[in-house]
Image: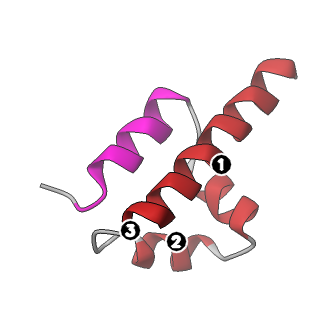
Amino acid sequence: MLANADIRAAAKGASVRIWEIADHLRISEPSITRKLRHELPQAEKDRIFSIIEEIAKEKAVD
């Protein structure tokens, strides 16, 4: 099973791309891809979940 499957599923369910999360974090897409290879601490996951929600809301407004 992939590490951080919950983050990947949340992003996919919200139609948010990994590169969009990276952009929000002000890091490169390869950096976030490497970061997601290993299970993240819960605090960091919570931050990413809130970013996913924020991006999804922005897309809903557009």
**Which residue shows up at 39% across the image and 61% down it?**
42
Residue drawn at x 47%, y 63% is 43
Q: In this view of the protein, which residue sits in the foreground, 10 or 17?
A: 10
Q: Secondary structure at mark 3?
A: loop
**At label 3, which amino acid type do we have?**
Leu
Who comes first in sequence, dot 3 or dot 1? 3
Residue kind at label 1, given as amino acid type: Ile
Which residues are drawn in magenta?
Answer: 3-14
Point out the image quarter for the C terminus. Answer: top right
Question: In terms of secondary structure, where does tag 1 sit?
Answer: helix
Residue 6 in the magenta stretch? The answer is yes
| Circle 2 SS class | helix
Kindly report which numbered mark, 2 or 1, lies closer to the viewer in this rendering.
1
Cα–Cα span, label 3 and label 1:
15 Å
The picture places residue 22, in percent across and down from the top left corner, at 64, 64
- The residue type indicated by label 2 comes to Ile
**Foreground: disc 3 or disc 1:** 1
Q: Position of residue 36 (x, y in %)?
A: 38, 68
- Which quadrant holds residue 24? bottom right
Residue 8: image x %, image y %?
Answer: 39, 47
Task: Find disc 1 in the rendering and name its residue.
Answer: 51
Q: Nearer the N terminus, badge 2 or badge 1?
A: 2
Q: Is residue 20 above or below residue 12?
A: below
Q: What residue do we see at 55% from left, 55% from top? A: 48
Render colour scheme: secondary structure
Mark 3 — residue? 36
Are the residues tagged 2 and 3 within 8 Å (C-beta)? yes
Pick the quarter of the image with the N terminus: bottom left
